[in-house]
Image (tube, grey):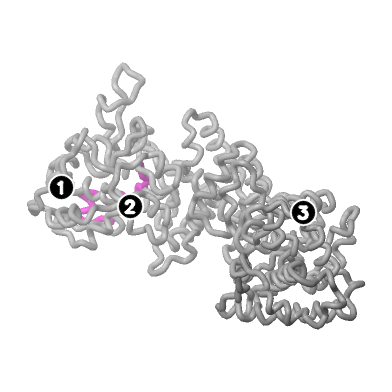
Amino acid sequence: MTGRPLARSLAPLPEESMAGFLLRLSFRIRRTPARTAELAGLGPIRNGRLSTDHLLGLAPVTATAFAAATRLTPREVADLGLRRFEDTYPALKAVPAHSRLATAFFARTWAFTLAPRYCPACLAGDGSPIQDLLGGAWKASWHLPVVFACPAHQRLLAHECPHCGGSSNPIHHRRAALLHRPGTPGIHPLACRGDAAVPGSSRLGACGPVCGARLDQPPSGAHPPPATGGVGRLIGLQQRLQARLHHAGPAPGGAYFPDLAATSQLIALSWPAPADGLTLEPWMLDLIDDHVQTIRAGAQAPDRWTAPQDSATCGALLLAAEHLLGDEHDPGDVRERLQPLAQAAFRRDASAYTALRRKTISPRLARALVRHRHGFHAAGRTENGSVRVASRDCRFGPQHVPPYLPQPWYDQHFADFADRLNNPTSYTPRHLRRAVSLKLAEMAAGGSYSQCARLLGIPVAKAASTMNKLRPQMGPTLWRDFEHRVDQIACRLDDDQARVDYARRRTALTHWRLPAEHWAALFGDLGPRFPRMAGEEGRLTATVLVWTDITQAEYTHSPVLAGLREAGADTGRLVDNIAQTYTPVNQKAGRLLLRRRITAYADRLAQLLDHGHRPEQPTQ
C-alpha cells in the first residue's frame, strides 16, 4: 500500500458503494479497477480478484491509506461500505469483519448479495456533467436483499442485463469477488461486466468478451415493464423498509429485519402451506411458486435459504412475510398464523427448526416457531437444544416459581378444573399443581417440561409422570384453558413486588437439618402425646416440614428423603409421619399445635433466608 495521492480523484455520490466508486474512479483515471485498487492502497490483487471484504468496509490501516490516496475523509470512506447499515440491518454484524468469506454464508443469512440489483434511471445520473460522463451511483443498499424497488422512480429494480440476460457481476463456482473481471480495461462504470457468449459455443466463460452493454440504456425497441397491478404495494413496502434501514439513532425493533428474513425463508420452506392465509395478488403467488419450485429442483441445498434475486419475487415474499408477522407490538395471532407454516416446513426438513432458531430473531418470533405438544414446548431430537425461549414476556424468572403450586393459588384458579378432566383421580390435583409450576417456568425461561423440571428441582421422572397422566385426560380445549389459567397466575407474579426467590431458598437448605435444640423447644412439652415423634425421627420429620413450607416444594422431593433413599434406608415411618401431618383429620389438639409451631418457625427462617442470612446448622 503506497498511500500516495492519485493524480485525480472523485467525490463519492450519495449512497455509493465501494464497488461503484472504484468503477467510476478507474474509468476516470483510465486504469483497470484492479490497478486502481492497488494504487489506492487496497493491496495487491491475488488471482485477479478483489476481496469481497471491501464491499463491507475497510480495515483501519487500509482505510487510512485509501483515504490518503483518494483524498476522501474517513467518514466518506466508511460510508462506501455496507457496514454503515449494520445498526439497522443486523445480518451484516454476523459477517466476520475482514476475513475470507464464503458466498453461501452471506447468501443464506440474507446479509448481502454480490450481484446488485439496480435502477436504470438512478444509474443514468442527475444530468450533471460528471454524471453524464461517469453515470450515477451504484448504491450500496442495492446489495441488500431487502432492497428491491426504487421509490424515487416508482419501479422495481432490475437484476439482469437486458442485452445478455446475465448478471452485471456474475459469480463463478461460488467464489466471492467484489467485481467480475477487474483487470479488463476500458469498461464504462454503467456497462454490464458479464461474459458475452463465445462465438460457436453455448457456454459463457471468462475467456469470452465482456458484454459491455450500458445498463442505464434499454435495448433498441425495448419498452419499460408494464405497471402490473399490485406493484404499488411492493413500492409501499419498500418505502417502509427503507425508513427502517436509514433510521438515524437507535434502531427501532432491532430484530425486525432478521424476523422478516426468517419468515420469508419459512414461507419458501413450507410452500404452499401458507397460500390460503396470504392476501397477495395471483401473479405474486405464481412468482413465489416458481421460485420455490426452482430451488427445490436445484442441486445446491443452500439455495433454499437465499433471497430471490428477481425483485418482484423477493418483494412478494417479503410482503407475505410482513403480513404474517403483523404488528410487532401486538403478538396476538402471530403464532396461529405461523404454526401451520412451521409444521409444514419441519415435516419436510427437521433441521429447519434449528436453522431458523439459530438466527438472531426476536423472542416473539421464536415463540411463534416453537412447536407445542400438549400445552408445552415440544423437545424432540432436533429441537431439544433450541426451545430455550420464554413462552411469554415475564417480569418474574424461573427462580420465582414455586415448584409445587401453593394450595391457595390452586383453589383460586383451578378449583373447578380437575373435575372437567377425563377420569380424574385423587392424584389429579397433585399432577395439576406440578404441571402449573412447570408451565410457569416455561413462560419465564423456555425449555421443554423436563428442562423446566430441572430448573425447579423437580425430578424429571416425576415431571414425565405428570405429563403422562394429564395427556390422556386433557384434550385441545382443556389445554388452552389450562394455559389461560396459568397465564392469570403469571400476571399475578408479574405484579408481585415482593417475589420470593425459591431457588435461593432451596440452595440454602440443601444440607440443612433442624438443630436439636430448636426441635426441643418446638416439641418438648408435647412429647408424652406423640412418642414416635420424639428423638431423631421427629427432628427429621420437622426438618422436612420446614423445608416444604419454605421452598413450596413437594415433601417427597426434600433433600432428607432423597438422601435416605440414596443410602438405601427405609423411609416408610418418616413418610407416614409427614403424611399424617398433612391429613385434615389429624389437624387437631396437640398435633395441630405442633404444626402451627413448625409453620411459625418456617416463616421466621424464610425471612432470614430472604435477607441473605445463612440457616443455623445443628451442632455436632
Label 3, on which residue?
Answer: 466
Name the image quarter holding residue 266: top right
Report the magenta residues as a range. 115-136
Q: Earlier in the sequence, mark 3 or mark 1?
A: 1
Q: Nearer the viewer, residue 575 or 44?
A: 575
CA gap, disc 3 and disc 1:
76 Å
Residue 28: numbered disc: 1
SS for callout 2? helix
Q: Mark 2 sits on what residue?
A: 140
Q: Is residue 396 visible?
A: no
Give the residue type at disc 1. Arg
Q: Is residue 116 magenta?
A: yes
Vertical arrangement, residue 407 with respect to residue 376, above or below: below
Closer to us: 323 or 461: 461
Please state which of residues 164 and 177 is positioned toward the viewer in this rendering.
Answer: 177
Mark 3 vs mark 1, foreground winner is 3
